[in-house]
Image: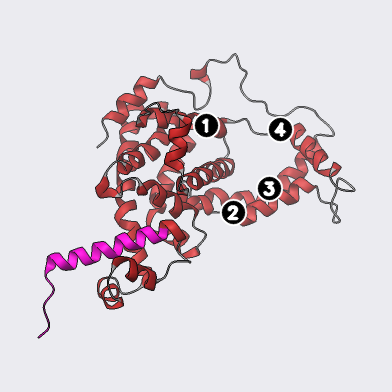
């Protein structure tokens, strides 16, 4: 007579399968992991995976959802709190805080994955599989749009497509760091044995990303200078088609990355416009540089920070708001 599996034992089996899938996903990525590896790591048979999840795809959906659903709920709660407290005074520092403070908190909770949580997050946003990208876009696009809109309110001087690219680059670089196995060791090494709480870590992270987000837009003179440098590296400053080299590079990058920022905090529309206009904008900028040395300049250094677009707020307001998050 077959022994009936108890509810508790079934729950344990399901958790072991999810844990094994999570570990292998962090180590190998989606394409390199197999159901055979998962069942071996979880010490179950294939029938158990089929019974609880039905397929590898459904298993990975469940594995990601059990971590990312809670993360994004906490992110939205903190962003809502900042919005209520600050309104039009919301800064990109606060938006970044709403993105990363919940992630750090969950990484301190063993029930949410513990130290492996940040590596899971980094792997999810850097995994090259179209399956993973499609999952993130389908399940968390509304969260991405909400944060993108918040960044746009905090940085009104940046065109939408420019903001999309900057977020794509910045968050992609950060995700790559988080996905590494040596992140904790690096933090310990850089801090030279000194303790660093979550707020200090967020402040260091934000200072780097804010600088990238607030960097002035390149003017026509800068674009022309860059094009000239590229031209010096070849036989002429133009390609065989007569196109400015920087324009071709911009178009290639836009085509490869359009919409990729949606899963990592920028919506798909953010990158879509960049590919269409990058070639024309760069070529026109290089031509304009021959007639003028001007261009849109960043706000003068003497301008008070409070009057700059996306200017900082006192740190205590950020600290106060973040402490109230669940």
Quadrant of the frame with the N terminus: bottom left
Q: Which circle, 3 or 1, is nearer the viewer? A: 1
The CA distance from mark 2 to mark 3 is 13 Å
SS assignment for the magenta stretch, majority: helix
Which label is found at residue 208? 1
Residue 82 sits in quarter: top left
Outermost residue to the right: 235
- Give the residue at mark 4: 219
The CA distance from mark 3 to mark 1 is 26 Å
Q: Residue 212's spot in the image, x, y percent?
A: 56, 34
For numbered disc 2, what is the local secondary structure?
A: helix
Estimate how packed mark 1 is, as few (under 14), some (14 to 19) or many (20 or more) residues with alpha carbons within 10 Å. few
The CA distance from mark 4 to mark 3 is 14 Å
- Give the residue at mark 2: 257
Which label is found at residue 278? 3
Q: Nearer the viewer, residue 115 or 217?
A: 115
For numbered disc 4, what is the local secondary structure?
A: loop
**Which of the two labelled residues, at mark 4 and mark 3, occupies the earlier sequence position?**
4
Q: Residue 42's spot in the image, x, y percent?
A: 29, 66
Q: Which circle, 2 or 4, is nearer the viewer? A: 2
The CA distance from mark 2 to mark 4 is 23 Å
Looking at the rendering, the stretch of residues picked out in magenta corresponds to: 1-25
The CA distance from mark 1 to mark 2 is 22 Å
**Image vertical order of residue 91 relative to residue 237, above or below:** above
């Amino acid at each position: 007579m077959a022994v009936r599996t108890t509810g508790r034992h079934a729950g344990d089996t399901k958790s072991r399968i999810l844990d094994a899938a999570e570990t292998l996903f962090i180590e190998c990525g989606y394409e390199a992991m197999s159901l055979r590896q998962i069942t071996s790591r979880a010490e179950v048979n294939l029938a158990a995976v089929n019974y609880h999840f039905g397929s590898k795809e459904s298993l990975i959906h469940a594995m990601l959802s059990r971590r990312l659903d809670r993360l994004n709920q906490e992110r939205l709660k903190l962003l809502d709190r900042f919005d209520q407290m600050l309104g039009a005074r919301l800064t990109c520092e606060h938006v970044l805080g709403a993105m990363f403070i919940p992630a750090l908190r969950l990484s301190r909770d063993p029930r949410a994955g513990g130290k492996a949580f940040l590596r899971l997050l980094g792997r999810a946003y850097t995994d090259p599989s179209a399956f993973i990208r499609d999952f993130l876009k389908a399940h968390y696009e509304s969260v991405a749009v909400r944060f993108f809109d918040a960044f746009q309110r905090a940085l009104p001087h940046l065109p939408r497509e420019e903001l999309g690219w900057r977020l794509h680059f910045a968050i992609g670089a950060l995700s790559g760091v988080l996905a590494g196995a040596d992140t904790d060791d690096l933090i310990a090494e850089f801090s030279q044995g000194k303790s660093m709480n979550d707020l200090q870590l967020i402040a260091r992270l934000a200072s780097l990303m804010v600088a990238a987000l607030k960097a002035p837009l390149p003017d026509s003179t800068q674009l022309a200078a860059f094009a000239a440098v590229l031209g010096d590296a070849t036989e002429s400053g133009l390609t065989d088609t007569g196109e400015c080299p920087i324009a071709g590079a911009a178009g290639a990058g836009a085509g490869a990355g359009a919409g990729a920022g949606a899963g990592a905090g920028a919506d798909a529309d953010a990158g879509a416009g960049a590919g269409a206009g990058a070639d024309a904008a760069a070529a026109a900028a290089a031509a304009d540089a021959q007639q003028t040395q001007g261009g849109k300049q960043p706000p003068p250094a003497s301008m008070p920070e409070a009057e700059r677009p996306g200017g900082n707020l006192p740190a205590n307001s950020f600290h106060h708001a973040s402490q109230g998050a669940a």
